[in-house]
Structure formats: structure tokens, C-alpha cells
Amino acid sequence: SGRIYAPYYRQASIWAYLRSQSGQRRTFDTAYADVKAAFLYYLEQYNRGRPLIILSHSQGTQMAVRLLEELYRARGLERILVVAYLIGERIGAEQIPGLAPCRSAAQTGCFVTWATVAMGAEPELLTGEPRGRPVCVNPLSWRMDEAFVPARRHLGGVPDSFDRIEPGLVGARCRGGLLEIAPPPSGYAHAGGDYHESDINLFYLDIRRNAQMRLRAFGAGR
């Protein structure tokens, strides 16, 4: 659907999360400074008014949320942002001033988030302090309700072997700010029932098709 730009940055290691608050702050401020500099360079040198889709996961989502908190209004990103897929973190409905959660498959100028666990499991890898009610958008329906969406609606995931697309693997529902899936799939990295490491590749084709849909809707509305 478009060109891909990814920042090189001094990513914080897993051990950074175990440091004191002041140590964490210094580490993540360094990481964020790199991401912000890369994004501003992209805006100034490459964007040229083109539609923008942001996709992030885990620590990348921490960086993307902070970026949007700071720049969404200040840089007028509402003019170009199609959608932000901010995956693998707890994000509140009021987290980003001016940017609301997506409530339908073709809505634009909004954000999508989920954190994947097996049905009934408790998350182990999530971080973040959501402002407002934690958001979960179901990638099988692109809605925020808690209705279970059956596996026949699952367009396809890419397993850890990265050698195929597997449709119809899981059904999913949002519950308590988490995305619960059933049955638990094999071949996708997880820690117990926590599928944090597979948040994106479990729904690879669903995300891809949805991004194309939102981009068409964005173009039609310009």
C-alpha cells in the first residue's frame, strides 16, 4: 500500500524495564530522542503531504504513543494520518489528545490497539499506564465491542517459520482491555497464554487488508 520508513534508534533492552524509575527515564528518553528525530526528518524530507500509516509494537508502541502525544496536534498530523496501529501496549481511550480509537473497519484519523492472550489467560509482558478506559479493537471485526468473532473471519497469520499464511486459525473477542483468542494456535511465539510476541503476525493479513481499506477511505474523503 505504500513506502516503508523505519527509524534506527537506540532501543532499550529488556533490562531497562528493571532499572529504577530515574534509570528507566534516562534510557527511554534516549530511545525516544532518536525516534522523534527520525520522524521529524521523515516529515520534512519524505512525506510531502502523503497519507501516513503508523504501525508499532511493544516498545515501539511506547515510542509511537509518546510521539503522537507530542506531535499529533503540534504538527497537524490529523491532515495526513490514515490510522495508527499501536499494538502490544495498554493504551487508554483518552491517551492521545485529539486522536480517538477506531470503531469501524474503514474509519480514518484514529488508532487501533490490542494485546493478545489465550482466552482466560493473564498477560505477562504488557506495560504502560493507560489514561482512560483501556482500549481493545478486535482485528477480526475492527470494532471495540466484546462480541466473539469466529475463526472463519480470520484472514491469516504468519507463523514463526515465516513460510506461509494461515487463515482461519483463531476466533477473538475483546474482554477487559485484552484480546482473547481461541483456540490457542501452535507455531506462534508466546509465554504461557500471553501472545504478546505474536500480536502482529497472528493477524498479518487482517492488518494488511484493513490498511488498504482505510487508505482507500482516506483517499475518497480528501
Image (cartoon, helix red, strand yellow):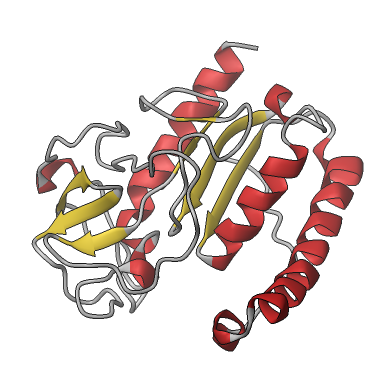
Q: Residue at x 71, y 81 (%)?
A: 23
Residue 173 shows up from this direction: yes
Q: Position of residue 106 (x, y in %)?
A: 42, 23
Q: Which residue of the protein is positioned furthest toward the bottom in this rendering?
A: 15
Among all residues in the image, which is located at the extreme front?
A: 21
Is 214 or 121 nearer to us in this picture? 121
Residue 211 image point, x, y percent: 48, 37
Rendered position, 13 above or below 98? below
Q: Is residue 210 left or right of residue 21?
A: left
Q: Which quadrant is home to the N terminus?
A: top right
* Residue shown at the point (17%, 48%) measured from the top left: 172
Query: Residue 50, percent across and down?
Result: 74, 31
Which residue is located at x 30 percent, y 47 percent?
177
Q: Is residue 67 left or right of residue 193?
A: right
How many callouts does the rendering have?
A: 0
- Please tell me which residue lies in front, 175 or 2: 175
Q: Position of residue 90 (x, y in %)?
A: 43, 54
Above-or-below relation of 34 to 215: below
Q: Answer above or below: position of 159 versus 13.
A: above
Tell whether 209 sits left or right of 4. left
Q: Residue at x 77, y 75 (%)?
A: 26
Is residue 2 left or right of 169 when viewed as pictured? right
> Please, which residue is most extreme toward the top here?
221
Quadrant where the C terminus is found in the figure: top right
Query: 168 above or below 98?
Result: below
Whether residue 9 can be seen here: no
| Image quadrant where residue 219 sits | top right
